Amino acid sequence: MRKILQALAVLILMLSALVSCGSQVSPQQGRPPTENVIPLQSAVDVPSACHPGKVYQSSETAQASLAGIPWAKAEPASSRIIAYLFFARPHTLGSRIYQPLHVGGRSVDGTSMKILWSIDNPQASKTIAITGRQLLDPQMKTFSQTFLSADTPAKMYPSTINVPAAGCWQLTLKSGMTTGTLIFWVLGN
């Protein structure tokens, strides 16, 4: 009986190890790392009625070119859509303050409103369609943009977001059967 219990304990440990290895997120899949993650704060005050997505910065990623780039996760998390916010990079080394999105595809200093969308979801397609809707304006302005996936790495979609007006914007992201949303506070120029 003791040998059976020992064998069963070993089997349970092996299964536990396999399950935990199988559930770990590979940073090469375009997901943000879970270690060395720093939450960032917007450089401007955002009205309490607008609830933009949380922005983070990581010192390490599988792709060295993405290390230090602020990022945000789309909702729901099951969409597995990550926005790498190249426009939001803090201008001061070590700063925890990020620059917000601006209207017209560029900020006053000429910074392009570049976002690299990463979708680690097998239901994603070769395009990402982005529909923006202004949340706090009674006029409910909207805009749409579509971007192609990069050749390599797969499921990465470079974009320059061209929001038409300042305010609180919800972006709905759709690629194949994958859908997610992100809210941004957008500044005028």
Image (cartoon, rainbow, N blue to C red):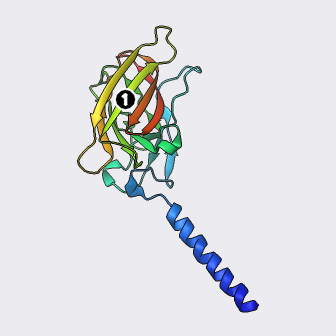
Front position in the image: 105 or 153: 153
Q: Quadrant of residue 118?
A: top left
| Picture layout, residue 99 above or below residue 96 | above
Give how far across and how far down residue 27 sits, in percent.
Answer: 41, 56
Q: Nearer the viewer, residue 82 or 18?
A: 18
Q: Is residue 99 above or below residue 164?
A: below
Residue at image coords 55%, 22% = 50
Residue ID at (40%, 49%): 122
Give the image location of residue 39, x and y in percent: 52, 42
Instruction: Identify the residue at image location x=52%, y=23%.
Output: 45
The residue tagged 1 is 130
Query: Which quadrant of the structure image shows residue 130?
Result: top left
Q: Amino acid under label 1?
A: Ile
User: Is 111 left or right of 124, judged from the image as shown?
Assistant: left
- Relative to 34, say whether 171 is above or below: above
Residue 112, image x and y in percent?
A: 28, 29
**Does 18 sit left or right of 134 as displayed?**
right
